[in-house]
Image (cartoon, rainbow, N blue to C red):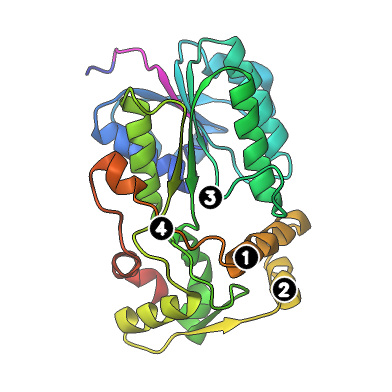
Amino acid sequence: MTHSTQPTILVTGATGSVGSALAVQLAQSNIPFRALIRTLDKAGNLKQLNGIELVIGDFNDNQSITNALKGIEQVFLLSNSSEEAESLQCNFVEAAAKSNVKHIIKLSQFAADVNSPVRFLRYHAAVEQKIKEKGLQYTFLRPNLFMQGLLGFAVPIKYQQQFFATAGDAKISLVDIRDIAAVALEALIAKDKENKIYNITGPEAISHEEIAKLLSVVLGKEIKYINVSDEEMQKALLQVGFPNWQAAGLIEDYAHYARGEAAMVSHVVKEVTGKAPRRFVDFVKEYKSAFE
């Protein structure tokens, strides 16, 4: 494919973890695409990617969204975490329905449900509903906890040989973001992925205690998992600068994990991409330097 081919795919959230992984995989597959970014200085390595067309826009600015959607038939929908994420994504869906968009691949979350006690799971379900209401073809990607999320614990792991959470001894089928991006890529290029919901997990469900053991083995030093109360966790999150709504949402997320509601292992990654999903131990080996 040449660069002159008009892209029919728009990737939103292209500077985020999953969005940037998808952008890399599209470029490697020689598929031209447009990436929505808020400012050029946020583009970073995206600028170097093969077949990318950068477009400046913001979910708060309807005109910029309309411009970004010109000529687009498929959208990978992802926005940064904010208190307004649900309304911003729903507005985006409205704009997409008015333009030429046929298919939205939405990055949702494992166990998304409008009646969930977890606000993030309610918001994702509400956006999913909006996409269906608008009569657009959809693929809902519902990944479990990201392995890369553990990088948020890198500092205490590195300097205190321990990390803290409220997950108890519940098992969670963590998934690598590159495997999520690989499923998204297939949803964009294969013609039989419309109107599907994919629960995306890693190949095994492991507890935070087991995460600590695997870290210990790979790093060659003992790493401990300390289970803390919701109050302690919330206080710690607020101290490192999380806004109230996000800290409260993460506590709800972890309560969902602690209840054992994220232990299911699916075979979606293998079924959709043909490749086995990455194991947690492989993730730790690859990202070892972040924890040392």
Instruction: Please name whichever residue, 246 or 119, is drawn nearer the observer in this view of the structure.
Output: 119
Q: Distance between the Cα atoms at labels 3 and 1?
A: 13 Å
- Residue labelled with disc 1: 254
Residue at 71% across, 50% down: 119
Q: Distance between the Cα atoms at labels 4 and 2?
A: 26 Å
Whether 94 is drawn above or below 126: the answer is above
Whether 237 is drawn above or below 26: the answer is below
**Where does the magenta region start and end?**
4-11
Rendered image: mark on residue 265? 4
Q: Local crowd at mark 2 within 10 Å, few (<14), some, or many (≥20)?
A: some
Residue 90 lies, in percent from the top left, at: 67, 28
**Label 2 element class:** helix
Residue type (three-letter) at the residue carrying disc 4: Val
Whether 189 is drawn above or below 8: the answer is below
Query: Quarter-wise, where is residue 87 in the image?
Result: top right
Q: Distance between the Cα atoms at labels 4 and 1?
A: 18 Å
Q: Is residue 105 magenta?
A: no
Mark nearest the camera among 3 and 2 is 3
Q: Earlier in the sequence, mark 3 or mark 4?
A: 3
Residue at 50% across, 58% down: 145
Rendered image: mark on residue 230? 2
